Image (spheres, rainbow, N blue to C red):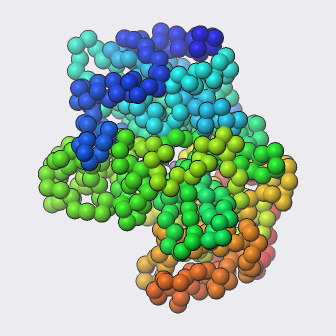
Amino acid sequence: MEKNQKLIQWVKEWETRCQPKSVHWCDGSEKENQELLDLMVQSGAAIKLNEEKRPNSYYFQSDPSDVARVENRTFICSEKEEDAGPTNNWCAPAEMKEILTGYFDGSMKGRTMYVIPFSMGPLGSEIAHIGIQITDSPYVVVNMRIMTRMGQQVLDILGDKDFVPCVHSLGAPLQEGQQDSKWPSAPIEDKYISHFPDTNEIWSYGSGYGGNALLGKKCFALRIASNMAHRQGWLAEHMLIMGITNPKGVKKYIAAAFPSACGKTNLAMLIPTIPGWKVETVGDDIAWMKFGDDGRLYAINPEAGFFGVAPFTSMETNPNAMLSCRANTIFTNTGLTPDNDIWWEGIGYDIPEGTITWTNEKYDAANRKPAAHPNARFTAPAYQCPAIDKDWENPKGVPISAILFGGRRPGTLPLIYQSFDWNHGVFMGSIAGSEVTAAAIGLKAGVRRDPFAMLPFCGYHMGDYFAHWVKTGVTAPDSSKLPKIFNVNWFRKGSDGKFLWPGYGDNIRALAWIFDRVEGTVDAVQTPIGFIPKKEDINIAGLDGIESKMDEILKVDANEWVAECDLIAENYGQFGDRLPKEMTEQLEKLKARLA
Ligand code: OXD
Ligand code: MN
């Protein structure tokens, strides 16, 4: 540490600006962690959960105004506005820094400033990167300890090398004698989640929740890392990583991108319903990928924990997630039972009498307020997942054989289709999207295009991002070793409005086809949109009543796709001349095949 002058200077500069009462360099030890948790229990910010039922676990309730990522308060402050592109909020870096310097001035008064050294990715991995986060939130420290590799060992390997500086303040200074609140934060209009991609910096102000505050996750591992990857020729993606082993014992890894709330964590931890198949988890949210010496694309999970959505996770829907948070877990905004355990909607058993809601009221079924906030979360160490892959911390990463895109689409998209080639696969990623219901606040009903599931996370112009994917195919050391690309849709509905496909563990039946396509052991049907399975090649043994639905599940309707092409063209319009010509060509070719 002593050696890294940039780090020491930087911490001093922020100490002077934020005026904390003290500075604490986090060593990541068990002792430090316990002291912080005890401190938060004493102050009333945390409740220690029932040691018998939920060992070494803690419960938090956020402020009702600070419950999720704030996309409209998230900024990409590139030097040039056009580099942020049409999908990001932009502000000039100098202007944003001036605004925020005003906010940060004295913002940590009465609080401790913590300095958190963390590694995104296994320590010392060539694909990993180091960040240092400054924060005045002890809640953030204990979460970062689960979500990243954090502490002294990171400083040891940092030496005098460069790091990504991440500054975070709750924006709630304490005056002399002022009583702290349970969840300090700033009002929505004062929140700023700002990224400076030209200098690899993150300045986050005013929120203590999830992706706004745990800066290693969306801010660093996606928004800043996507810029680094663009410059340096690798990929930083909103993708889960899973290993699949077939009944012959052959193993392959796949990466899959889905918009938020489309079941990434469930897919990453899937328990197969067909005998002989095995799924193991490498990561549930983010993948960093680089070509290895053998010409294959290798992926690491830069994170060390799961920040999972709690509601509707149960022993039925995702036993591996339930077992991941059986101990050593932080719960935020779930319900709290009278015997100090957690409860949420869809946990799989009735709500115990006397449960307290996330807003700290006695649960009352009559007033229809849920016990858990819909975005309530568990922060659990990845190694606690019973299905964790043996190579999840391999510094080399795992070789990726297939990439999947998907979303919730009640119509048009079949269960699976495979791209004709790399650029057609990039096109598939660029047109990905998910259905929005009219009930979602502020969003127009219909398809919300979410290219590569990166809409809220791509830290530069989306058109340039598509071009980066095209270039990755061109510059690949060996194009025959590129992952094959697929699109999946578990959410197609029949005319009765019900899902046609059972989903969850039965998704292995679609993954098995993908596996066999990669192996080259199964044929396919060529359609205008790509290759789809022959009906008989999807194993539906043991699924009651599915056979009669298979035609609809796999249907490619030319009329629906012609309409889809119009929507794609409309969405592409916003990217102007930064839309790579390869994507326009793909759209034209698709139209021609449909004609
Ligand atoms: C997440 C998200 O929390 O994508 O992972 O919003
Ligand atoms: Mn995510």
Question: Residue 473: percent from the left, percent from the top?
Answer: 80, 53
Quarter of the image for residue 365 reads bottom left
9 or 444: which is nearer to us? Answer: 9
30 is higher (above) or lower (below) than 470: above
Question: Residue 491: percent from the left, percent from the top?
Answer: 50, 71
- Most extreme residue toward the bottom is 548
Q: Say if residue 68 shows up in the picture.
A: no
351 is higher (above) or lower (below) than 458: below
119 or 575: which is nearer to us? Answer: 119
396 is higher (above) or lower (below) than 479: above
Q: Residue at x 25, y 30 (%)?
A: 41
Q: Quarter holding the N terminus?
A: top right
Q: Residue at x 40, y 64 (%)?
A: 317
Q: Is residue 310 left or right of residue 591?
A: left
Quarter of the image for residue 60 reads top left
Q: Is residue 170 left or right of residue 60?
A: right
390 is higher (above) or lower (below) than 231: below
Q: Is residue 302 left or right of residue 171?
A: right
Q: Quarter holding the C terminus?
A: bottom right
Question: Residue 323: percent from the left, percent from the top?
Answer: 39, 53
Q: Residue at x 78, y 57 (%)?
A: 482
Question: Residue 136: percent from the left, percent from the top?
Answer: 40, 22
Quarter of the image for residue 303 reads top right
Q: Residue at x 50, y 77 (%)?
A: 501
Q: Say if residue 440 shows up in the picture.
A: yes
231 or 575: which is nearer to us? Answer: 231
Q: Is residue 427 left or right of residue 411?
A: right
Count of marks, rendered view: 0
